[in-house]
Image (cartoon, rainbow, N blue to C red):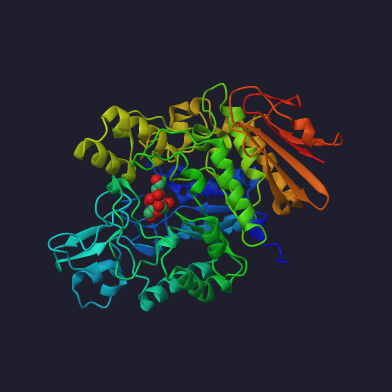
Amino acid sequence: DQAIKWWQKAVVYQVYPRSFQDTNHDGIGDLQGIIQHLDYLQKLGVDVIWLNPIYRSPNDDNGYDISDYQEIASDFGTMADFEELLKAAHDKGLKIIMDLVVNHTSDEHAWFKESRSNTTNKYRDFYFWRVGNAGNPPNNWDSAFGGSAWKYDEQTKEYYLHTFSTKQPDLNWENPQMRQSIYDMMNWWLKKGVDGFRMDVINQISKLPGLPDGPLKPHSKFGDARVTNGPKVHDYLQEMNREVLSKKDIMTVGETHGITPDDGVKYAGFDRQELNMVFEFQHLRLDNSQHGFGKWSTRKTSLVELKKVINNWQVALKDKAWNSLFWNNHDTPRAVSRFGNDSEQYRDVSAKMLATCLHLLQGTPYIYQGEELGMTNAHFKNLADYRDIETLNAYQDIVTKSHLLTNDDMMQRIEANSRDNSRTPMQWNTLVNAGFSDVTLWIKVNPNYSTIKVDAALVDKNSTWYYYQKLITLRHDYPLVTLGDFKLLLADDPNIFMYQRHWQGQTWLVICNFTEQTLNCPVNEYLNGREQQIISNYADDQHNNLRPYESKVYSM
Ligand code: TEU
Ligand code: CA
């Protein structure tokens, strides 16, 4: 039996530094802003903070294009600020994990500048340089942000690979010196005292040898021709584990698009010496377009499919690996807008329902900043209000260049799916700009901050905020929440998500109504008469009668 690790009992809070709190009046969140709110996070009860990238960056992709791994972006502060943050967090018993972006660097990173200077430079092979194919790119791979994944470079008349923006050249993990440089950098951060890493697109670091063309799917230029789960990815992660990860008691979570539960067991298996957990995305892709526009869709997720995916992960990883649990992050719409209902009437109750459903699964839950308030999508109607490179490039490709969709159609899809939905500033209070900053912001604040905001949540004992606090406390108090077996009930019910957790003779029953209908549900059939209610988002209990977005949990 595997001894329980601290990160299995933990709740993680994701801070998007650019949008958390500005303290020096430049309209951009910063490290001092995070320090200012550590008490807030401690009161919520979370154990770990994951910081999106805070390294030096020209900011083509909000910090995921890093030009120096060992410097802090001046937008966010200095290394002294970071050390202050780390110490202040540790003093409060909070851990900090860093974003680690090592599939690619910025094109302004010193390695890439060297690499691009001439074909014999010793850094040349740190990246992928190839000659063209009769005036065309070396292969037909697409970039995740539109267009070819190759960019021609005049200096040496060759192309370099960038599976994201042209300013994010892919690192060549085949090169042992490159790998060693990454491990040295990681060890340097561990020596500073950071508590782990969230690893950006880590399952893309091994490319198929020979970089062969991919299959051409219909509309493939908006599709997903990225290289995932390549042949050496597990060798690299095991090497990284030996060289870095195994040396300290840290936590790691890999961001891994396009993986199945079987892959998950490979990346995060207890006996694999790779990562502690992965973020899988199957449950966040069920609403993608079936007509070639990928995430730019207005379909709704089917609850039956959602339950199936979550059940698959819960079952497949049982006793073998560890799940991470999340409804949203800085790349997705807001959970309450996507899976709940962000109308005034149902926002609060549906946010609590979603929290119940997620936090009582087996795995480590992640809360994305503002989720604990029930923050909603931005609902920006105007392209000029969006900042995200993925959104802007997609509009260019799909509307401006190809005329495949009309402006109105695409704007609706952007409103539903843009990454900027989760990137609007944290809503603290009713001061100007929600108390985030008193000057012009890098991105607009959501106008609904007059009602959705921290100060109001903290004086209302029935707020979504206190509901999250209670769920976190339940996890800390009851080993069943961490360790219990999971069993899905009513798998085919299109409206109700119901499951059991079972541990040492104790059973919890979790019931969630995902609709705004009042439903009849055979709750009593699953109770034994000696049950106690643990938590609910309604004040009274009507047993078999499930009101809109009602969720309740019983212990027996
Ligand atoms: O995201 C990985 C990724 O695959 C994204 O393109 C994702 O598919 C997209 O955002 C969904 O709309 C990671 C980071 O989380 C993201 O913020 C970065 O832009 C990306 O890597 C490149 O570093
Ligand atoms: Ca600032």
In x, y percent, where is residue 389? 31, 45
Q: Does residue 74 lie above or below 176 as drawn?
A: above
Q: Does residue 374 lie above or below 43 as drawn?
A: above
Q: Quadrant of the N terminus?
A: bottom right
In-image side of 158 versus 356 (left or right): left
In x, y percent, where is residue 246? 57, 72
In x, y percent, where is residue 102? 40, 64
In-image side of 25 versus 534 (left or right): left
Q: Is residue 194 visible to us here?
A: no
Q: Quadrant of the C terminus?
A: top right
Q: Residue at x 52, y 48 (%)?
A: 14
The quadrant where residue 459 appears? top right
The front one of 398 and 8 is 398
In x, y percent, where is residue 55? 40, 58
| Label tally | 0
Q: Residue at x 35, y 76 (%)?
A: 175
Q: Residue at x 30, y 27 (%)?
A: 408
Q: Residue furthest right?
A: 530
Q: Does residue 458 lie above or below 556 as drawn?
A: above
Q: Is residue 164 visible to us here?
A: yes
